[in-house]
Image: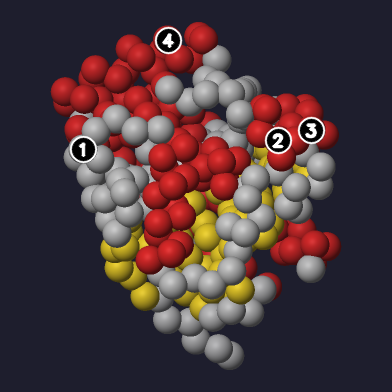
């Protein structure tokens, strides 16, 4: 039985040093997590991928301003976060295109990168709507933004984040909930505020990019996220030349955390199909 050793460090990017965890050897595979959380949301999925596809190096990156990455010092954009991802990949010495797996924010960063086949070889977007945040949801988030900036993840903020990220059943699972709560506690108030503004409130429509994503792609929806339904994922996949979609049940936004086994099966099957 092979033993995999994790290596962790920060790598320089235009948005400050990003915290990176590397496990395994082989084809480079980047996992980029959702807003509000960090790479520990992949911890249940990673052993399953290592067992099912051991000939890969898994590169788990905390997004700018989140997790153990350096705090954001200014407002930015998802496009600039994608440029920071390029910086990180280059700083790590990765040769050739990567297989990209992105959850929510990670999927949005992937939409920016996946139009360039020299950077991304295959693309998996998990619970990552291509449209901007709906108006009513944007209004609710805007009300929470000042609270987050001034007081951090206090109870009303925690409650809203958990409701957006997890199903009711997942929210009662202490292991799952602990990952979210610990992730929320790591960034500074200022950094989380900048990230919320930059990566959620300011998120733009990227539908027009879909036709230019020619690499093999998989769009994964859950059965319990209103703004990225199975039908939404199907419509998005129909607009990309080489994409398919599927739905995983019993999850909301954090599918890797809520349903790691089902997601691992889907990812491994996709990789087998695309070679």
Q: Secondary structure at mark 1?
A: loop
Q: Which is nearer the N-term, disc 3 or disc 1?
A: 1
Residue 139 - label: 4
Label 3 close to label 1 by CB (< 8 Å) = no
Instruction: Give the residue pinned by disc 3.
Output: 239
Instruction: Give the residue pinned by disc 1.
Output: 73
Label 3 close to label 2 by CB (< 8 Å) = yes
What distance separates the C-alpha of mark 2 from that of mark 1? Answer: 31 Å
Q: Which is nearer the N-term, disc 2 or disc 4?
A: 4
Residue 180: percent from left, percent from top: 38, 44
Q: Which is nearer the N-term, disc 1 or disc 4?
A: 1
What distance separates the C-alpha of mark 1 from that of mark 4? Answer: 24 Å
What distance separates the C-alpha of mark 3 from that of mark 1? Answer: 36 Å
What distance separates the C-alpha of mark 4 from that of mark 3? Answer: 29 Å
Q: Quadrant of residue 243?
A: top right
Give me the residue at 17% from left, 26% from top.
Answer: 151
Can you name the residue that lies furthest to the bottom here? Answer: 1
Residue 195: percent from left, percent from top: 33, 34
Q: Which is nearer the N-term, disc 3 or disc 2?
A: 2
Q: Residues within 10 Å of mark 2 (few under 14, many from 20)?
A: many
Instruction: Give the residue pinned by disc 2.
Output: 210
Residue 16 - label: none
Give me the residue at 29% from left, 63% from top.
Answer: 10
Q: Secondary structure at mark 2?
A: helix
Q: Secondary structure at mark 3?
A: helix
Q: Is residue 206 left or right of residue 180?
A: right
């Amino acid at each position: 039985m092979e033993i995999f050793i994790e290596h962790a460090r920060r790598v320089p990017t235009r948005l400050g040093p990003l915290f990176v965890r590397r496990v395994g050897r082989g084809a480079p595979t980047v996992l980029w997590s959702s807003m509000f959380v960090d790479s520990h949301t992949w911890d249940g999925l990673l052993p399953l991928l290592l067992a099912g596809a051991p000939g890969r190096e898994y590169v788990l990156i905390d997004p700018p301003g989140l997790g153990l990455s350096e705090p954001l010092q200014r407002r930015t954009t998802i496009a600039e976060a994608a440029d920071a991802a390029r910086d990180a990949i280059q700083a790590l010495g990765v040769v050739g295109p990567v297989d990209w797996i992105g959850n929510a924010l990670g999927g949005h960063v992937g939409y920016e990168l996946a139009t360039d086949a020299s950077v991304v070889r295959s693309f998996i977007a998990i619970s990552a709507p291509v449209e901007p945040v709906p108006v009513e949801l944007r209004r609710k988030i805007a009300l929470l933004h000042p609270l987050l900036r001034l007081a951090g993840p206090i109870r009303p903020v925690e409650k809203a984040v958990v409701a957006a990220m997890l199903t009711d059943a997942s929210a009662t699972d202490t292991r799952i909930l602990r990952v979210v709560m610990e992730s929320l506690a790591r960034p500074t108030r200022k950094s989380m505020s900048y990230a919320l503004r930059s990566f959620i409130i300011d998120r733009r429509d990227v539908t027009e990019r879909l036709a230019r994503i020619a690499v093999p792609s998989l769009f994964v929806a859950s059965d319990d996220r209103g703004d990225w339904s199975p039908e939404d994922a199907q419509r998005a996949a129909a607009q990309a030349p080489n994409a398919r979609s599927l739905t995983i049940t019993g999850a909301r936004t954090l599918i890797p955390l809520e349903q790691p086994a089902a997601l691992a099966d889907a990812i491994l099957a996709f990789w087998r199909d695309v070679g």
